[in-house]
Image (spheres, helix red, strand yellow):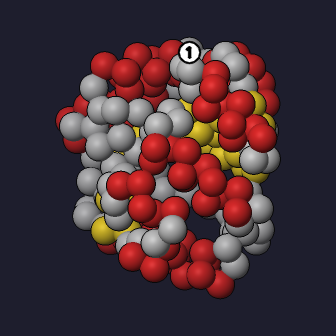
């Protein structure tokens, strides 16, 4: 699986490291190049501007934002909306206000871009304490069922090589701890 990750704070860095440990390909971008360089030395694909980041991702693109909720996330979603194509997936892991997520999902859907809000918590310990990870599902029965199937698939096949598909609703308040 290939995933683009924007936002390499302590949690974003550890998300990338966990994915790299399980042989996933990660394209990384951050406003400060030092963190990009560090993860590139660990096997990630470095991107030093947004256009370079977009170009290095295979279509359809899957991008995980790990930015603080608020203006930084809002500005990045707007910038990405101008560059992404129909069929691309944008995931916000930054605990944004659910009303903002619903608005973003509707706006991006007009361009055919899938938007998922999956606020992420659990701190920086998630890299080492994987046994406490759990996905909380709030909202539609279909989304909950698909998340259960994803969790089972990840246990059975950590590289998810044979798994295809996505969930495309927003504003549900799913959390990863």
Q: Secondary structure at mark 1?
A: loop
Residue located at (69% from left, 41% from top): 39
Figure quadrant of residue 141: bottom left
The C terminus, quarter of image: bottom left
Viewer-closest of 169 and 69: 69
Residue 169: x %, y % from top left: 39, 50
Figure quadrant of residue 74: top left
Residue 38: x %, y % from top left: 68, 37
Above or below: residue 141 compared with residue 101: below
Would residue 95 appear left or right of 59 to someone viewing this image?
left
Above or below: residue 131 compared with residue 61: below
Viewer-closest of 52 and 153: 52
Residue under pointer 1: 82
Residue 158: x %, y % from top left: 67, 73
Figure quadrant of residue 163: bottom right
Residue located at (42% from left, 62% from top): 125
Above or below: residue 67 compared with residue 119: above
The N terminus, quarter of image: bottom right
Residue 145: in sight, yes or no?
no
Viewer-closest of 37 and 150: 37
Viewer-closest of 147 and 93: 93
Would residue 138 appear left or right of 92 to someone viewing this image?
left
Residue located at (38% from left, 69% from top): 135
User: Exactly how many numbered labels are in the figure?
Assistant: 1
Residue located at (45% from left, 63% from top): 126
């Amino acid at each position: 699986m290939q995933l683009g990750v924007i936002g390499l704070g302590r949690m974003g860095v550890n998300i990338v490291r966990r994915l790299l440990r399980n042989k996933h390909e990660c394209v990384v971008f951050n406003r400060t190049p030092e963190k990009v360089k560090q993860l590139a030395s660990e096997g990630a694909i470095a991107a030093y501007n947004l256009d370079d980041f977009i170009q290095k991702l295979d279509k359809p693109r899957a991008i995980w934002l790990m930015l603080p909720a608020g203006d930084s996330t809002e500005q990045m979603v707007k910038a990405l909306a101008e560059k992404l194509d129909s069929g691309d997936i944008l995931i916000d892991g930054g605990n944004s206000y659910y009303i903002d997520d619903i608005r973003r999902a509707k706006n991006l859907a007009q361009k055919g871009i899938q938007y998922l809000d999956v606020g992420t918590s659990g701190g920086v310990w998630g890299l080492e304490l994987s046994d406490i990870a759990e996905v909380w599902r709030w909202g539609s029965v279909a989304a909950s069922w698909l998340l259960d199937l994803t969790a089972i698939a990840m246990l059975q096949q950590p590289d998810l090589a044979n798994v295809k598909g996505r969930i495309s609703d927003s504003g549900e308040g799913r959390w990863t701890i």
